[in-house]
Image (cartoon, coloured by chain):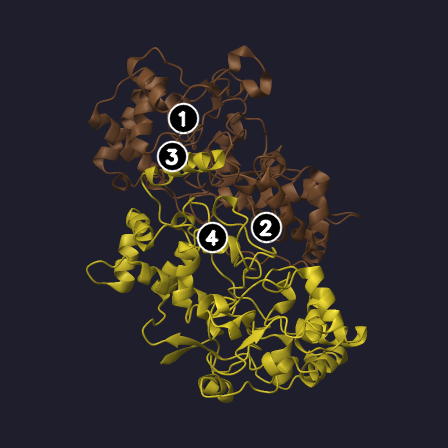
Chain colours: A yellow, B brown
Amino acid sequence: MHTHLIIRSPRRGWQSLLLACAGLLAAPLAVADGEFPAKVPVPADNPMTPAKIELGKQLYFDPRISLSGTVSCNSCHMVQSNGSDNLPLSFGVFGRVDVPRNTPTVYNAAFNTVQFWDGRASSLEEQAKGPILNPVEMGMPNAEAVVDVLRKIPGYHAQFAQVFGGKEPITFDHAAEAIASFERTLVTPDSPYDRFVKGDKKALDVTAQEGLKLFNSVGCGTCHAGPMFDNPGLPMGEGFYQKFPAQPQNAACAKYVQKYHLHGDLGRYDVTHKDADKERFRVPGLRNVALTAPYFNYGTVPNLQEAVRVMAACELGKNLTETQTKQIEAFLNSLTGKFPQVTLPHLPQTPDSTLLMKVADMAKEMQKK
Amino acid sequence: MHTHLIIRSPRRGWQSLLLACAGLLAAPLAVADGEFPAKVPVPADNPMTPAKIELGKQLYFDPRISLSGTVSCNSCHMVQSNGSDNLPLSFGVFGRVDVPRNTPTVYNAAFNTVQFWDGRASSLEEQAKGPILNPVEMGMPNAEAVVDVLRKIPGYHAQFAQVFGGKEPITFDHAAEAIASFERTLVTPDSPYDRFVKGDKKALDVTAQEGLKLFNSVGCGTCHAGPMFDNPGLPMGEGFYQKFPAQPQNAACAKYVQKYHLHGDLGRYDVTHKDADKERFRVPGLRNVALTAPYFNYGTVPNLQEAVRVMAACELGKNLTETQTKQIEAFLNSLTGKFPQVTLPHLPQTPDSTLLMKVADMAKEMQKK
């Protein structure tokens, strides 16, 4: 179903083999052993082209596809930062404070088997539509409203036509396809860990190497497996959605649950309405995890060391020593990759700004309520 | 007082001579006749260096120097767009709707003699500080709070030290100097008009050429003079701050005043508290004016044709024919230059996000009020 975009020159084939086989594995891999994939998976029905990527980049940075005309994908998933915004919870359209979960990073999201904390989207294409239409996030009322905005921007007509052809090239699906294509370029290979796996034993210092061993021996690697450390099991397979907190009876965990308000998010249950899915979440990948504080679904845990402690206590029922915590932190620091250089797009302009002029009045009305 | 950054290879010297002499002119030039300057003015006490420009770009795109952690310079002055946000009035921090005036474009702001609609800043360096500390815009309480945030970001320590040296390189002044240096790269030369002035008579079609003649003959060029069409007279000289609306007794103007709420902004008076300065404003430059709708201090006029009509009626007391309006619009369209390619910066990360975690609670409190 997937072709692959080569990220750099192809190397040993086993990484892509591993990716390709991931869907066949019934249980997660037991050890974290994958080098960063040489290729990003590309759906056969949405091939990447330079023009599509460029269009997707424009849409990604274009706040006009939000109800206020001020929120773009990049407002929360900041490409110039870590692909997120370092906030516990992002602010939504018109400064709304009821965004329910922490914003995941867009970097390497191309490798996620499913998207969102609760896995409710199975592709980047599907994910891209979510926040645009979410009343709390970008707030557009429906797909037609998005298309209506895009069709009012003459420059987009030519670009959508060039990329997608057809009688009516500007559609919400096409916009999402272009955005997803741009997002597939946001990958961060070449971390110290990757250099280590490739044989450069100096790429990790002793502390990080001890951390890597511990990561696997204490059990982190059971779920955080595969090259993205996100559990490459089948989405429907056992263990794909993990309970958090899984060990609330552990005394340390109980303390963290209280301190960081870890209870109360129904997680995957919101999608399936099965009791067994309550408080279950997609296992987030760990690439660049050192840059994506604060942590977890509510973004309540402020730093990586504390996140390691919380995971050990609440997922594994284990209390780490300070030395162990620092060793695992050192290993996680080694997962920070090289970020791509992204040239800012230049958005096509609207000759008439009536499009956005209603917004200020609307905002003032909302403020009055 | 100024050195010059060469934008492209130096050409005929009269443009820079014109710029250099601008400060000596007692009255505005009578005709719009300047090609885009080959050099951007650079203050002697803030020379541009690649490292300073890069640091300034990071700060420009960094929302952490706002009270909410979500508003950067680029939120309203969007580099990926026209240097503004195409909104009548921008939304401020926490979605505030009381930003008082339309956001001017950052493109070519380096050439403005003074900054802001009311000219209350005399340099880009001074301007850059304004929105950061404005309670309605980025909302930081004071310079110390900005410095406090920047000092909590380890990557900035090394960069400020490299750029500015000294015992305590991270200061609000230095941040503003870096931002201003980046902004001096945001210039748009090579418009069709510039090619026309250089001798390519085909660069403007007949309509635009008629528009250029009209622009001067009806009187637009009296104030919109010089290479940036922003009146290069002395800031304190006669006519530098122009009354708007100047001809409210004109019947057409009176209609526009009512329709677009053109009255009520005290303009320059807010700075000087002199009665004569009531409703006086800096003459905005016209480079890329076709891209910066909606127009005027309240952003109430939706498109360029209407803006031309309003100006003719309210500044010159003249009613243009539809043909004349379209000719002048065609000329103004020819002032759209070539935008620079800007590589997105990569912001240094905070290892601990406590910095931003207080924000969500604060926002929720504010929302309750």
* Chain ID, mark 4: A
Q: Residues within 10 Å of mark 4 (few under 14, many from 20)?
A: many
Give the chain of mark 3.
B
Q: What residue is rendered at 76% in x and 78% in y?
A: A207
Q: Nearer the viewer, residue A111 or A241?
A: A241
**Numbered tag placed on residue A137 in the rendering:** 4
Contact (Cβ within 8 Å) of mark 2 with mark 4: no
What is the distance, in whole Å, between disc 3 and disc 4 at their CAs? 25 Å
Instruction: Give how far across and how far down residue A289 sits, in percent.
Output: 62, 68
Q: Which mark is residue B224?
A: 1
Q: Is residue A352 visible?
A: yes
Residue type at mark 4: give it: Glu
Figure check: B7 above or below A280 = above
**Quarter assignment of residue B308:** top left
How far across and how far down the image is residue A80, in percent?
54, 57
Of pointers 3 and 1, the one earlier in the residue sequence: 1
Mark carried by residue B62: 2
Marks 3 & 1, CB-CB < 8 Å contact: no
Q: Chain of mark 2?
A: B
| Residue B73 horizontal side relative to residue B102, left or right | right
- Asked if badges 3 and 1 are on one and the same chain, I answer yes
Dots 4 and 1 on the same chain: no
Q: Amino acid at mark 3?
A: Pro
Quarter where residue A167 is shown: bottom left
Question: Taking A70 as reference, is A202 left or right?
Answer: right
